[in-house]
Amino acid sequence: MTSNLLRAISLLDNIDRAIILLWLEEKKYDEISEITGLSRSAVSVRLVRVRKKLEEHIKKLENE
């Protein structure tokens, strides 16, 4: 992983950080749901939002 990605992940709140790290470990949505206590659909929605946040954070970090 690039250092900007790691920095961007560190800027996320705890639940979003947990979700993206589990996803990066190639956990299935059902597994992430069980671990986090969120519904499978909530995990799916949050992953879309988290990836968008990461993209925005990385762009900001690259412009620093």
Image (cartoon, grey):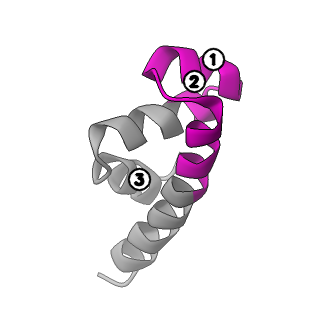
**Disc 1 to disc 3, C-alpha distance:** 27 Å
Q: Position of residue 62 (x, y in %)?
A: 41, 77
The residue wearing badge 1 is 31
**Disc 2 to disc 3, C-alpha distance:** 24 Å
Q: Position of residue 47 (x, y in %)?
A: 58, 48
**Disc 1 to disc 2, C-alpha distance:** 4 Å
- Tell me the quarter of the image containing the C terminus: bottom left
Q: Are marks 1 and 2 in contact (CB under 8 Å)?
A: yes
Packing grade of label 1 (10 A; few <14, some 14-19, many >=20) is some
Mark 2 element type: helix
* Left or right of 36 on screen, residue 30: right
Tell me, for residue 3, which label it has, or none: 3
Q: What residue type is labelled 1?
A: Glu
Specify the segment rendered in magenta. 22-48
Packing grade of label 3 (10 A; few <14, some 14-19, many >=20) is few
Mark with earlier residue (1, 3): 3
Q: Where is residue 29 in the image (x, y as percent from the top left)?
A: 68, 28
Residue 27 visible in the current orientation: no
The residue wearing badge 2 is 32
Main SS, magenta residues: helix
Q: Establish if 19 lies above or below 59.
A: above
Mark 1 element type: helix
Name the residue: 49% across, 15% down.
Answer: 35
Name the residue: 39% across, 68% down.
Answer: 57
Count all numbered tags in the image, as a single digit: 3
Tell me, for residue 22, which label it has, or none: none
